[in-house]
Image (cartoon, rainbow, N blue to C red):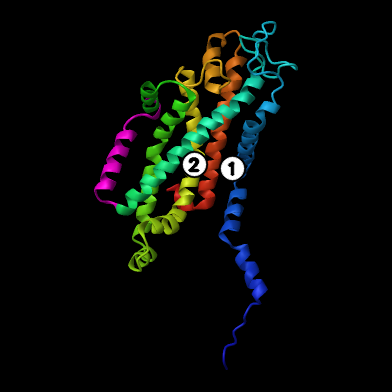
Amino acid sequence: MSASVQLKPLSQQQTEEELFSPRREFFRKFRAQKLAFYSLFLVLLIGLTALFGAYLTPYSPSEPDYNAVLMPPSLSHWAGTDHFGRDILSRIIAGTQISLLVGVMSVFFGALLGTLIGLTSGYFGGWYDSLMMKLTDVMFAFPGILLAIGLIAVLGTGLSNVVIAVSIFTLPIFIRIVRASTLTFTNMTYIEAARSIGVKDWSIMYRHILPQVLPVIIVYLSMRIGVAILIGASLSFLGLGADPSTPEWGAMLSTSRDYVTVAPHVVFFPGLAIIITVLAFNVLGDGLRDALDTKLKE
Protein backbone atom coordinates (compact mmCIF):
# COMPACT_ATOMS: atom_id res chain seq x y z
CA MET A 1 0.00 0.00 0.00
CA SER A 2 1.51 3.26 -1.06
CA ALA A 3 1.59 6.09 1.41
CA SER A 4 -0.66 8.94 0.42
CA VAL A 5 0.73 12.45 0.48
CA GLN A 6 -1.72 15.12 1.52
CA LEU A 7 -1.04 18.45 -0.13
CA LYS A 8 -2.26 21.65 1.43
CA PRO A 9 -4.18 24.12 -0.71
CA LEU A 10 -2.08 26.98 -2.07
CA SER A 11 -4.15 29.57 -0.22
CA GLN A 12 -3.55 27.77 3.09
CA GLN A 13 0.21 27.58 2.43
CA GLN A 14 0.28 31.31 1.67
CA THR A 15 -1.66 32.04 4.86
CA GLU A 16 0.83 30.05 6.96
CA GLU A 17 3.79 31.76 5.27
CA GLU A 18 2.28 35.17 6.00
CA LEU A 19 1.52 34.11 9.58
CA PHE A 20 5.13 33.11 10.25
CA SER A 21 6.84 35.80 8.17
CA PRO A 22 9.82 37.55 9.81
CA ARG A 23 7.95 40.85 9.87
CA ARG A 24 4.96 39.40 11.70
CA GLU A 25 7.27 37.55 14.07
CA PHE A 26 9.08 40.81 14.86
CA PHE A 27 5.85 42.69 15.62
CA ARG A 28 4.57 39.78 17.71
CA LYS A 29 7.73 39.74 19.84
CA PHE A 30 7.81 43.53 20.13
CA ARG A 31 4.15 43.81 21.21
CA ALA A 32 4.79 41.15 23.85
CA GLN A 33 7.22 43.56 25.56
CA LYS A 34 4.76 46.01 27.06
CA LEU A 35 7.34 48.44 28.44
CA ALA A 36 9.14 48.73 25.09
CA PHE A 37 5.82 49.03 23.26
CA TYR A 38 4.75 51.94 25.48
CA SER A 39 8.20 53.49 25.08
CA LEU A 40 7.64 53.55 21.32
CA PHE A 41 4.52 55.68 21.79
CA LEU A 42 6.42 57.92 24.20
CA VAL A 43 9.22 58.39 21.65
CA LEU A 44 6.63 59.20 18.97
CA LEU A 45 5.03 61.73 21.34
CA ILE A 46 8.43 63.33 21.97
CA GLY A 47 9.03 63.47 18.23
CA LEU A 48 5.66 65.12 17.58
CA THR A 49 6.37 67.61 20.36
CA ALA A 50 9.68 68.46 18.68
CA LEU A 51 7.94 68.96 15.32
CA PHE A 52 4.94 70.97 16.50
CA GLY A 53 6.26 72.43 19.75
CA ALA A 54 6.06 75.99 18.45
CA TYR A 55 2.25 75.60 18.24
CA LEU A 56 1.90 73.92 21.64
CA THR A 57 3.65 76.37 23.97
CA PRO A 58 1.13 78.26 26.14
CA TYR A 59 3.58 81.17 26.58
CA SER A 60 6.59 82.54 24.74
CA PRO A 61 9.63 80.46 25.76
CA SER A 62 11.97 83.47 25.58
CA GLU A 63 9.88 86.46 26.70
CA PRO A 64 10.52 87.40 30.37
CA ASP A 65 7.79 88.40 32.82
CA TYR A 66 9.31 90.09 35.86
CA ASN A 67 5.94 90.07 37.63
CA ALA A 68 5.99 86.25 37.72
CA VAL A 69 9.55 85.45 38.82
CA LEU A 70 10.15 81.98 40.34
CA MET A 71 6.46 81.18 40.64
CA PRO A 72 5.74 77.60 41.79
CA PRO A 73 3.62 75.27 39.62
CA SER A 74 0.04 76.51 39.35
CA LEU A 75 -2.97 76.39 37.04
CA SER A 76 -1.59 79.29 35.01
CA HIS A 77 1.97 77.91 34.89
CA TRP A 78 1.88 74.13 35.19
CA ALA A 79 5.65 73.79 35.70
CA GLY A 80 6.18 77.20 37.32
CA THR A 81 8.42 80.00 36.07
CA ASP A 82 12.17 80.62 36.15
CA HIS A 83 14.22 83.54 37.49
CA PHE A 84 13.19 85.68 34.51
CA GLY A 85 9.51 84.83 34.84
CA ARG A 86 9.56 82.63 31.72
CA ASP A 87 7.15 79.71 31.65
CA ILE A 88 9.17 76.52 32.26
CA LEU A 89 6.71 74.21 30.49
CA SER A 90 6.89 76.36 27.36
CA ARG A 91 10.68 76.29 27.48
CA ILE A 92 10.75 72.51 27.95
CA ILE A 93 8.44 72.04 24.95
CA ALA A 94 10.53 74.40 22.83
CA GLY A 95 13.73 72.72 24.03
CA THR A 96 12.48 69.29 22.91
CA GLN A 97 13.27 70.18 19.31
CA ILE A 98 16.79 71.37 20.15
CA SER A 99 17.70 68.43 22.39
CA LEU A 100 16.21 65.84 20.04
CA LEU A 101 17.89 67.45 17.03
CA VAL A 102 21.28 67.26 18.75
CA GLY A 103 20.72 63.61 19.67
CA VAL A 104 19.36 62.43 16.32
CA MET A 105 21.79 64.34 14.10
CA SER A 106 24.89 63.40 16.07
CA VAL A 107 23.97 59.70 16.19
CA PHE A 108 22.97 59.71 12.51
CA PHE A 109 26.31 61.13 11.36
CA GLY A 110 28.26 58.94 13.78
CA ALA A 111 26.38 55.83 12.67
CA LEU A 112 26.73 56.67 8.98
CA LEU A 113 30.50 57.11 9.11
CA GLY A 114 30.94 54.31 11.65
CA THR A 115 28.99 51.88 9.46
CA LEU A 116 31.09 52.75 6.42
CA ILE A 117 34.38 52.32 8.29
CA GLY A 118 33.26 49.16 10.11
CA LEU A 119 31.91 47.57 6.93
CA THR A 120 35.05 48.20 4.89
CA SER A 121 37.35 47.34 7.80
CA GLY A 122 35.72 43.98 8.42
CA TYR A 123 35.45 43.13 4.73
CA PHE A 124 38.91 44.09 3.46
CA GLY A 125 40.94 43.46 6.64
CA GLY A 126 44.72 43.86 6.43
CA TRP A 127 46.58 47.00 7.43
CA TYR A 128 43.45 49.12 7.00
CA ASP A 129 41.53 47.02 9.52
CA SER A 130 44.46 47.09 11.95
CA LEU A 131 44.75 50.88 11.69
CA MET A 132 41.02 51.46 12.21
CA MET A 133 40.94 49.17 15.24
CA LYS A 134 43.90 50.95 16.84
CA LEU A 135 42.24 54.33 16.31
CA THR A 136 39.01 52.94 17.75
CA ASP A 137 40.87 51.63 20.81
CA VAL A 138 42.39 55.08 21.35
CA MET A 139 38.93 56.69 21.23
CA PHE A 140 37.53 54.08 23.63
CA ALA A 141 40.36 54.83 26.06
CA PHE A 142 38.83 58.24 26.84
CA PRO A 143 35.61 58.53 28.88
CA GLY A 144 32.81 59.77 26.64
CA ILE A 145 32.18 63.11 28.31
CA LEU A 146 35.92 63.90 28.52
CA LEU A 147 36.34 63.13 24.83
CA ALA A 148 33.42 65.43 23.99
CA ILE A 149 34.80 68.21 26.21
CA GLY A 150 38.22 67.91 24.57
CA LEU A 151 36.68 68.15 21.11
CA ILE A 152 34.62 71.19 22.13
CA ALA A 153 37.80 72.81 23.46
CA VAL A 154 39.31 72.43 19.99
CA LEU A 155 36.22 73.23 17.91
CA GLY A 156 34.69 75.94 20.12
CA THR A 157 31.31 76.21 21.82
CA GLY A 158 27.93 76.12 20.07
CA LEU A 159 25.28 73.56 19.16
CA SER A 160 26.79 72.75 15.76
CA ASN A 161 30.10 71.86 17.40
CA VAL A 162 28.23 69.82 20.03
CA VAL A 163 26.74 67.75 17.19
CA ILE A 164 30.23 67.19 15.73
CA ALA A 165 31.71 66.29 19.13
CA VAL A 166 28.92 63.85 20.02
CA SER A 167 29.12 62.34 16.51
CA ILE A 168 32.82 61.59 17.02
CA PHE A 169 32.01 60.24 20.50
CA THR A 170 29.42 57.93 18.88
CA LEU A 171 31.70 56.83 16.03
CA PRO A 172 33.81 54.05 17.66
CA ILE A 173 30.88 51.99 18.97
CA PHE A 174 29.39 51.73 15.47
CA ILE A 175 32.77 50.92 13.92
CA ARG A 176 33.24 48.09 16.41
CA ILE A 177 29.78 46.49 16.17
CA VAL A 178 29.52 46.76 12.37
CA ARG A 179 33.01 45.34 11.90
CA ALA A 180 32.23 42.40 14.21
CA SER A 181 29.01 41.64 12.33
CA THR A 182 30.74 42.00 8.95
CA LEU A 183 33.42 39.48 9.96
CA THR A 184 30.65 37.00 10.74
CA PHE A 185 29.21 37.15 7.21
CA THR A 186 32.33 37.76 5.10
CA ASN A 187 33.42 34.11 4.92
CA MET A 188 29.97 32.62 4.41
CA THR A 189 29.31 30.43 1.37
CA TYR A 190 27.02 32.82 -0.49
CA ILE A 191 29.59 35.64 -0.14
CA GLU A 192 32.32 33.36 -1.52
CA ALA A 193 29.99 32.38 -4.36
CA ALA A 194 29.34 36.04 -5.19
CA ARG A 195 33.08 36.71 -5.30
CA SER A 196 33.71 33.68 -7.52
CA ILE A 197 31.31 34.91 -10.22
CA GLY A 198 32.93 38.35 -10.27
CA VAL A 199 30.53 40.46 -8.20
CA LYS A 200 32.27 43.67 -7.15
CA ASP A 201 33.27 44.14 -3.52
CA TRP A 202 31.14 47.25 -2.99
CA SER A 203 28.11 45.46 -4.42
CA ILE A 204 28.66 42.52 -2.06
CA MET A 205 28.95 44.83 0.94
CA TYR A 206 25.89 46.88 -0.03
CA ARG A 207 23.56 44.12 -1.24
CA HIS A 208 24.55 41.09 0.83
CA ILE A 209 26.33 42.14 4.03
CA LEU A 210 24.75 45.48 4.97
CA PRO A 211 21.16 44.09 5.12
CA GLN A 212 22.39 41.46 7.59
CA VAL A 213 24.04 44.12 9.76
CA LEU A 214 21.08 46.53 9.75
CA PRO A 215 19.28 44.98 12.78
CA VAL A 216 22.33 45.66 14.95
CA ILE A 217 22.61 49.22 13.60
CA ILE A 218 18.92 49.93 14.25
CA VAL A 219 19.15 48.72 17.83
CA TYR A 220 22.22 50.80 18.64
CA LEU A 221 20.78 53.84 16.83
CA SER A 222 17.80 53.93 19.18
CA MET A 223 19.92 53.32 22.26
CA ARG A 224 22.64 55.85 21.41
CA ILE A 225 20.17 58.68 20.75
CA GLY A 226 19.35 58.75 24.46
CA VAL A 227 23.05 58.79 25.36
CA ALA A 228 23.69 61.57 22.81
CA ILE A 229 20.89 63.69 24.28
CA LEU A 230 22.39 63.22 27.74
CA ILE A 231 25.92 64.15 26.56
CA GLY A 232 24.58 67.19 24.67
CA ALA A 233 22.67 68.36 27.74
CA SER A 234 25.77 67.83 29.90
CA LEU A 235 27.87 69.98 27.58
CA SER A 236 25.26 72.75 27.65
CA PHE A 237 25.10 72.48 31.44
CA LEU A 238 28.86 73.06 31.55
CA GLY A 239 28.48 76.12 29.30
CA LEU A 240 30.05 74.42 26.27
CA GLY A 241 26.91 73.90 24.20
CA ALA A 242 23.80 75.99 23.70
CA ASP A 243 23.67 79.67 24.56
CA PRO A 244 22.40 80.14 28.15
CA SER A 245 19.32 82.01 26.90
CA THR A 246 18.37 79.14 24.59
CA PRO A 247 15.53 76.89 25.82
CA GLU A 248 17.73 73.80 25.78
CA TRP A 249 17.31 71.37 28.66
CA GLY A 250 20.95 71.33 29.76
CA ALA A 251 21.22 75.12 29.49
CA MET A 252 18.01 75.46 31.53
CA LEU A 253 19.56 73.38 34.31
CA SER A 254 22.76 75.42 34.18
CA THR A 255 21.11 78.84 34.43
CA SER A 256 18.66 77.75 37.15
CA ARG A 257 20.97 75.83 39.50
CA ASP A 258 21.57 78.89 41.71
CA TYR A 259 17.85 78.95 42.59
CA VAL A 260 17.39 75.26 43.40
CA THR A 261 17.10 75.87 47.16
CA VAL A 262 14.37 78.53 46.89
CA ALA A 263 12.57 77.16 43.82
CA PRO A 264 13.43 73.49 43.19
CA HIS A 265 10.93 73.25 40.34
CA VAL A 266 13.28 75.24 38.07
CA VAL A 267 15.63 72.24 37.85
CA PHE A 268 13.18 69.42 38.57
CA PHE A 269 11.12 69.66 35.38
CA PRO A 270 13.99 70.09 32.87
CA GLY A 271 15.82 67.23 34.60
CA LEU A 272 12.67 65.11 34.45
CA ALA A 273 12.38 65.77 30.71
CA ILE A 274 15.96 64.54 30.18
CA ILE A 275 15.41 61.42 32.30
CA ILE A 276 12.14 60.45 30.59
CA THR A 277 13.55 60.97 27.09
CA VAL A 278 16.76 59.02 27.73
CA LEU A 279 14.87 56.15 29.39
CA ALA A 280 12.32 56.02 26.56
CA PHE A 281 15.01 55.61 23.90
CA ASN A 282 16.98 53.08 25.97
CA VAL A 283 13.94 50.90 26.71
CA LEU A 284 12.89 51.11 23.06
CA GLY A 285 16.37 49.99 22.02
CA ASP A 286 16.23 47.04 24.42
CA GLY A 287 12.85 46.04 23.02
CA LEU A 288 14.04 46.27 19.42
CA ARG A 289 17.09 44.18 20.28
CA ASP A 290 15.00 41.42 21.82
CA ALA A 291 12.46 41.46 18.97
CA LEU A 292 14.93 41.56 16.08
CA ASP A 293 17.28 38.85 17.26
CA THR A 294 17.71 37.17 20.62
CA LYS A 295 21.39 36.61 19.77
CA LEU A 296 21.95 40.38 19.87
CA LYS A 297 21.69 40.19 23.67
CA GLU A 298 25.11 38.60 23.68
Q: Where is residue 7 in the image (x, y as percent from the top left)?
A: 62, 80
- Which segment did they paint magenta? 125-146
Side of 184 where 294 appears, left or right: right
Q: Which amino acid does label 1 sit on?
A: Ala
Check disc 1 and report the residue beneath it. 36
Side of 160 where 276 appears, left or right: right
| Residue at far left of view | 127
Residue 169's image quarter? top left
Please name the residue shown 63% across and 20% down the image: 91
Please name the residue shown 48% across and 52% down the image: 294
Is the Cβ of the residue at disc 1 closer than 8 Å to that at disc 2? no
Side of 128 where 6 appears, left or right: right
Q: Where is residue 115 in the image (x, y as percent from the top left)?
A: 41, 45
- Check residue 221 in the rendering and tell me which mark sits there, or answer none: 2
Using the image as rendered, state which of residue 72 and residue 168 is in the foreground: 168
**Does the magenta portion include 150?**
no
Using the image as rendered, state which of residue 100 and residue 159 is in the foreground: 159
Image vertical order of residue 166 relative to residue 64, above or below? below
**Does the magenta portion include 128?**
yes
| Residue at far top of view | 67
